[in-house]
Image (cartoon, helix red, strand yellow):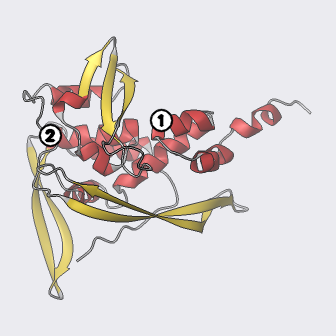
Amino acid sequence: MPIVKVKREDILREDEFREMLNKLEGKDTIIGEYETTLHGEPVVQKFRIECKQTQCLLCLLWIFGKRIQEILLLRRKDLYVEDGFLFVDFIVLKKKKRKSVRERYTKRITLEHPYTHYITDYMSSINDPNAYIFPGGSRPRKFVSKVNVYEYSMDEKGNVRRKLKDTKIYQYERSERGFMSSQLAWKIIKFLNPNVYPHLFRHSLATRMAKHSFTEDQLMSWFDWDSPKIAHEYVERGPRLTEQASRRTW
């Protein structure tokens, strides 16, 4: 049965994120459960969750806001520490194809960030540079992905509302195998918090960055967007465009 990806209109708050991390703290493994149907009958799927590995996954999502598939494709050699920063070389999906070989886009975050230690601690447990950070049973696949573009407004009570504006379709192939499937990652996250899903991390980070007055160019560079359209939608909802008006005293 296909996974139903229910969307929420707000963002992932840090207290929710910490609760997810805390459910894994001090444990090696836990057993997760996912309720679904098989041949019309309700079943409960059970799966093993590696706690330190999952904390690493959650923190990569929280800090970098990358797509879940881009994080699951990471190998040990793609993460390294230099000059007080954690560097990560991501293969970016959904980019317009200009070359036959997929390019990597490097992002870095200070080691002073409160959640980088979950990533570096788990990195230290992997010796093979070619090993996937998140190993699993995935196989080569062809993907057709639909991404909804929304326009946002605010009601009289100050609640943010959104309306479907456009739907974009992306097609790409994945030849790699041997890493965790995005379906399993989705189930793990939903088990830790039923109201959270992988793409919510990306949307939430973009929203927070816009609230901290990051520019369209900065958002485009961080999220590797080809068009400024999406970045503008986030900036438009943030305080940057009204900064001058906010400083007035009349």
**Pick the front one: 114 or 228:** 228
* Residue that carries the numbered disc 2 in the rendered image: 132
Residue shown at 38% from the left, 47% from the top: 16
Position of 165 with respect to 15 (left or right) is right
Residue drawn at point x = 55 percent, y = 61 percent: 149
Q: Position of residue 75 (x, y in %)?
A: 18, 36
Q: Is residue 250 above or below residue 113?
A: below
Please identify the residue farthest to the right as the structure is shown. Answer: 250
- Depth check, front residue: 86 or 200: 86
Point out residue 175 in the picture as x, y percentages from the top left corner: 20, 53
The C terminus, quarter of image? top right
What residue is at 63 percent from the left and 33 percent from the top?
Answer: 213
Instruction: Tell me the quarter of the picture where residue 238 sits.
Output: top right
Residue under pointer 1: 222
In this image, 233 relative to 219: left or right?
right
Q: Is residue 245 visible?
A: yes
- Quadrant for residue 54, please give it: top left
Q: Secondary structure at mark 1?
A: helix
Tag of residue 68: none
Residue type of the residue flagged with mark 2: Tyr
Measured as percent of width and height from the top left, residue 55 is found at 23, 40
Sequence-wise, the earlier of marks 1 and 2 is 2
Q: For this rendering, which residue is in front, 24 or 120?
A: 120
Determine the CA span between mark 1 and mark 2. Answer: 23 Å
Q: CB atoms at circles 1 and 2 under 8 Å apart?
A: no
